[in-house]
Amino acid sequence: MPVSASVGKNNVTTSPATSGLFRTSLIGYRQRREERVARRISPISPLLAFGVFALLANAAIAIVIRHNHSPSVTAASCADLLITLPAVYYLLVVRAGVQPLITIVPVLLSGLLRASFVASSSGVSRIIIAAGCELGIAWFLIRRGRKSLFARVLISELSIFYNALACWGMKPDVLPGGRGFSMHKESGTGLLFGLLAGLSLIEAACVHLVVRRWSTSIAWCISGLSVYGALLLIALSRSFTLRPIVVMRHSVLIRAGMLWSIEVARENIARIEAISPPFPDRGEPGYLRITGIADPNLILELRESSTAEGLFGRRKNVSRVGISADQPHELAQAVKAMIAGAF
């Protein structure tokens, strides 16, 4: 009679029958997962079901906490946020094959953030927890889906704070072996954005003093939006200096600060030439002006359409690019030399 399993003092061995049964079970699970994918089960249904459940659960917790803030009720509510919700997400979404197991991380972080409010923690600790959770969720979303719209918008938001606050004294971003060309000095684009940022802060202070007579909360909300707008303008002003047009050996990287960016390979460039009025219309299909506030003085035509990336996750397929360079003749000569392989 074959022994199905023998347990020793330090080891466990299984019979071929047990191993085969395990492999069969694993293969069956994978086959069921593949069948669900093959049937193209819409990911909206499980995610929508979880979203509705999470919304109802948070509403119920808010109502219960409002009427009974005892320690036992608070502990139970936190347990629901940190254990029940992630478990429901696993059962509804992960096991259905809609999302991988790692996606449970932002659910846990969101539950931790919500629990910090339910537990009535101190203001400082709540801010620390909120900042940690938001950074964790942001890192996860960027790491998991750089190409998704949400991740691109999030990257743009982070780049605004980086360019406005953390890049002072840095040199322009020109790769080794490349040659940079500015587009903001002759037109004064960077200076204009910096001036608007300063004026917006002065205006925000005046508006705050007036509005707080009626509502302090609204006054601070307006001031917060004004500060964010000023940071955006400062970031745009700095980005024109830090992100110039760069001609490299095999491609040209055309950038208007943070507003637009497109990299065109040497083989995809049809021609580059000077341009004069009348200029192409901004809304013309396949045409993109990467010029700041000035009119274009060069136009680059592509053999095949390429994708340009803009601020806040915008994308556009373009076949012609209008460029406003401080040194248009030198830029055109550098691109032509690059096309000829003499750069």
Image (cartoon, helix red, strand yellow):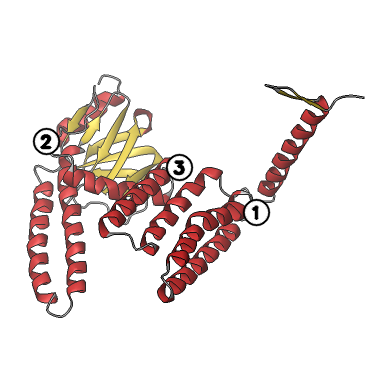
Left or right of residue 4, residue 29 in this image: left
Which residue is more in the foreground, 4 or 268? 4
Q: Point out the frontmost of discs 1 and 3.
A: 3
- Residue 276 appearing in the image: no
Residue underneath mark 3: 144
Query: Three-letter amino acid code at disc 3?
Result: Arg
Q: Residue at x 43, y 65 (%)?
A: 71
SS for tag 2?
A: loop
The C terminus sits in image quarter: top left
Query: Three-letter amino acid code at disc 2?
Result: Gly
SS for tag 3?
A: helix
Which residue is more in the foreground, 8 or 101? 8
Q: Residue at x 79, y 34 (%)?
A: 21
Residue underneath mark 1: 41
Left or right of residue 150, residue 243 in this image: left
- On the image, the x and y values in percent for residue 121 come to 32, 60
